[in-house]
Image: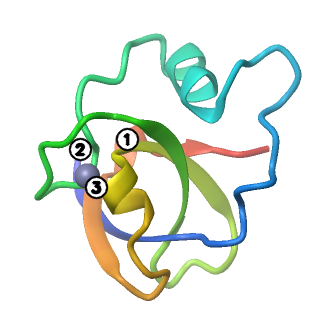
Amino acid sequence: MSFIDVKNKNGTADKNPPAGYKSWLDFWESKKGKKATTCEVLTCSGEPDVGGHVIKSGEGSKEYILPICYSCNNKPDDSVFKAWENDLEPVK
Ligand SMILES: [Zn+2]
């Protein structure tokens, strides 16, 4: 496992999760088969409030879901943070 740089992808608030999932956080927990226990931003110990849309720094526009707190979800989209690569769940 390793850490990678990720950034918030803004403009995703109106995107609904795929059919059968209550929320993006539910989507992440179902795909990963585990409960989110903390904000996944490496330096944060907040609650996993939402399934946030993020992109890998330097990878382009491919979206991933990551459980993060409201505060981290509101970081500007040019703010880079570190997260476990294995905990990113790709959006189809
Ligand atoms: Zn956080």
Is the residue marked by circle 2 packed among few (<14), some (14-19), or many (20+) residues within 10 Å? few
Q: Considering the numbered disc 1 on the image, is that residue within a helix, a strand or a loop?
A: helix
Residue 12 place in picture, x, y as percent:
71, 61
Closer to the observer: label 2 or label 3?
3
Q: Earlier in the sequence, mark 1 or mark 2?
A: 2
- Per the rendering, the mark at residue 62 is none
- Left or right relative to 92: residue 24: left
Q: Which residue is denoted by mark 2 in the rendering?
A: 1
* Front residue of 86 and 12: 12
Q: Is residue 76 above or below residue 42?
A: below
Q: Residue at x 80, y 54 (%)?
A: 14
What separation in Å lies between label 2 and label 3 (alpha carbons)? 10 Å
Say whether marks 2 and 3 touch (CB < 8 Å).
Answer: no
Q: Residue at x 30, y 65 (%)?
A: 4
Q: Residue at x 49, y 81 (%)?
A: 77
Q: Is residue 22 above or below residue 77?
A: above
Amino acid of disc 2: Met
Q: Quadrant of residue 82?
A: bottom left
- Per the rendering, the mark at residue 86 is 1
Q: Considering the numbered disc 2 on the image, is that residue within a helix, a strand or a loop?
A: loop
